[in-house]
Amino acid sequence: MKYTIALLACLIGALLFDGCASKPYTFHGTQLQPPMTFADFALTNQDNHTTRLSDYRGNWLLIYFGYTHCPDECPLTLAQFKKIHDDLKTDAARAHFVFVTVDPVRDTPEQMKVYLGQFDPSFIGLTGTPATLNLMYRKYGVAAEANADGTPKVDHTNAMYLFDDQGQLSFIYTGIPWQDIAADLRVLLKKKV
């Protein structure tokens, strides 16, 4: 009888411990381990000021490459940015949402400001010279080919790049629901991974 009670106590303890033990969080998207460090690029923001990604060191950056005349994926992605931003609530102050153009001919700072303002005026729009942007596309593995008239093809790279608070590329999201990206950011903003 004594052994039966002891065995029962052990089983109950094991069940309680297993049920209480927290499982590690599973991140969504592609996690780069170790994170990748990239060269910094001087670009122009929607307020016509020179901006570098390193200016945002200490904050997380979610970056998307697109263009303001895009008929489908870009507005959908920016709508996702807005949902993620709003879902983060006060934590959103430590996460910046960046839209880098693949159409520098038409995407002037003024055009970027008007376009991004339709989604959230806190979003950062970046443009630059074709030479600087083409170098950036190559470094980041972004496909942004232009048609003969200089306008981009609609089939540009459709991925979000998440940079950590040290300026390193940590995650790439392709086809991941915004709720999962927001969940990842909530975890990342609370602790260092």
Image (spheres, helix red, strand yellow):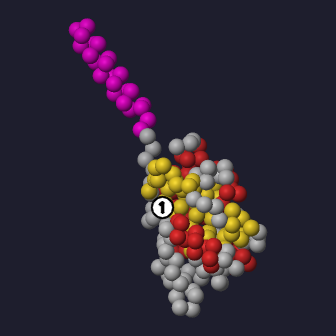
Q: Can residue 147 be seen in this view?
A: yes
**Number of callouts:** 1
Residue located 34% across and 27% down the image: 15
Mark 1 belongs to which amino acid? Answer: Tyr
Question: Vertical placement of 32 versus 160: above or below?
Answer: above
User: Foreground: 38 or 179?
Assistant: 38
Residue located 61% across and 73% down the image: 133
Q: Can residue 84 be seen in this view?
A: no
Q: Main secondary structure of the magenta part?
A: helix
Question: Vertical placement of 9 versus 150: above or below?
Answer: above
Image quadrant in which you'd find residue 78:
bottom right
In the rendered image, residue 157, in percent from the top left (x then y), is placed at: 49, 72
In the rendered image, residue 60, in percent from the top left (x then y), is placed at: 61, 53
Does the magenta-highlighted stretch encompass residue 4?
Answer: yes
Q: The magenta stretch spans which residues?
A: 1-23
> Would residue 142 be found to the left or right of residue 53 on screen?
left
Residue located 25% across and 7% down the image: 2
- On the image, numbered disc 1 is attached to which residue? 173
Element type at marker 1?
A: strand
Quarter of the image containing the N terminus? top left
Tell me if mark 1 has few (under 14), some (14-19) or many (20+) residues whose alpha carbon lies within 10 angstroms of its own: many
Does the magenta-highlighted stretch encompass residue 145?
Answer: no
User: Foreground: 95 or 53?
Assistant: 53
Image quadrant in which you'd find residue 17:
top left
> Going by the picture, which residue comes out furthest to the top?
2
